[in-house]
Image (cartoon, rainbow, N blue to C red):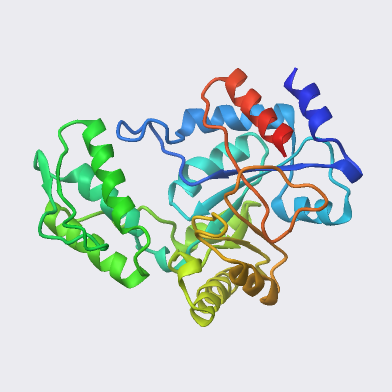
Amino acid sequence: MFKTVLKHLSPAGERGRLSVLIFHRVLPQPDPIFPGEVDAAAFDAICRWAKSWCHVLPLDQAVQGLRNRSLPERALAITFDDGYADNHTVAQPILQRHGLSATFFIATDFLDGGRMWNDTVIESVRRCPSAQLDLSSLPRPDGSGHLGQHPITTAVEKRQAITATIGAIKYLPVAERQALTERIAACAQVHPPHDLMLTSQQVREMRRAGMQIGAHTRSHPILATLDADAARAEIAESRQCLEQLLGERVGLFAYPNGKPGTDYSPESVAIVRDLGFDAAVSTTWGASHSHTDLFQIPRFTPWDRSKLRFGARFAGNLWRT
């Protein structure tokens, strides 16, 4: 049924549409704090549905199809952001079992033992030995008080504490945000792990296995908050790092967080174009067509666990575009 619907909504050629799925992590087992996070079983099902319903293409080929108006019907690409180690250890084997490829956008400062700021918050809450996380010694960045005292005895309470804390500090400058998260870890009496992100060797292995690698800045900043020189350096240096690592050109880019106007600006788009990338992806929901700006390709993922609901939301995303 869905194959027929998608054929109608996403035909070949001139009227072709490209759907791009976005993921971040694929966990080995469900996470009680974040039960909606994609785990191995859920990702295996998504790959099975995608292969059954769609023509799954590497993103660079899909971009070329958009440019030439030569997409196959039911065109789909799969992408991952940030560069988590489970992309290699969990997601890649599942993709390979289904004969699929994906594009992995890497924030290069976190390779080889780095850690993203939000994971410092998450792991501080997760591993805190106390029933309450006391952050009353840390002022809120907006000056409206302190970061609070958070009960964390249940998974729900931990999730609420994580959400509140991340929301309060998300738009700080990179260095300030990083320093504050380390203070949060100290308050929690936690030493967060250093193996959450990919190693350089894992990135090379993924590329040799047929996966694509794209740039995602160095430190995952909010590009819209940076001046032009700083934004250019973040984007260009991340690509340079990956090109040196892989010994080949890197032509694809993903905007961190990816909401236009909030997370990146028209100036950010102009920088990516000027640096000679082939295309870039956002996190705006929708599907691409022949008139889509190839430097703002939309992406989405239905998070529904059942085949029927996933397929319906997938089709709905095409219908609305």
Residue 165 vs 237, above or below: the answer is: above
State the residue at coordinates (40%, 64%).
110
Residue 40: x %, y % from top left:
47, 33
- Tell me: 289 left or right of 219: right
State the residue at coordinates (14%, 59%).
186
State the residue at coordinates (88%, 48%).
70
Quadrant where the N terminus is found in the figure = top right
Q: Quadrant of residue 9?
A: top right
Q: Nearer the viewer, residue 166 or 310?
A: 166
Q: Inspect this view and state whether residue 63 appears.
A: yes
- Tell me: 148 left or right of 194: left
Q: Nearer the viewer, residue 43 or 121?
A: 121
- Tell me: 248 left or right of 35: right
Residue 62: x %, y % from top left:
76, 50
Q: Inspect this view and state whether residue 248 appears.
A: no
Residue 238: x %, y % from top left:
53, 71
Furthest-front residue in view?
144
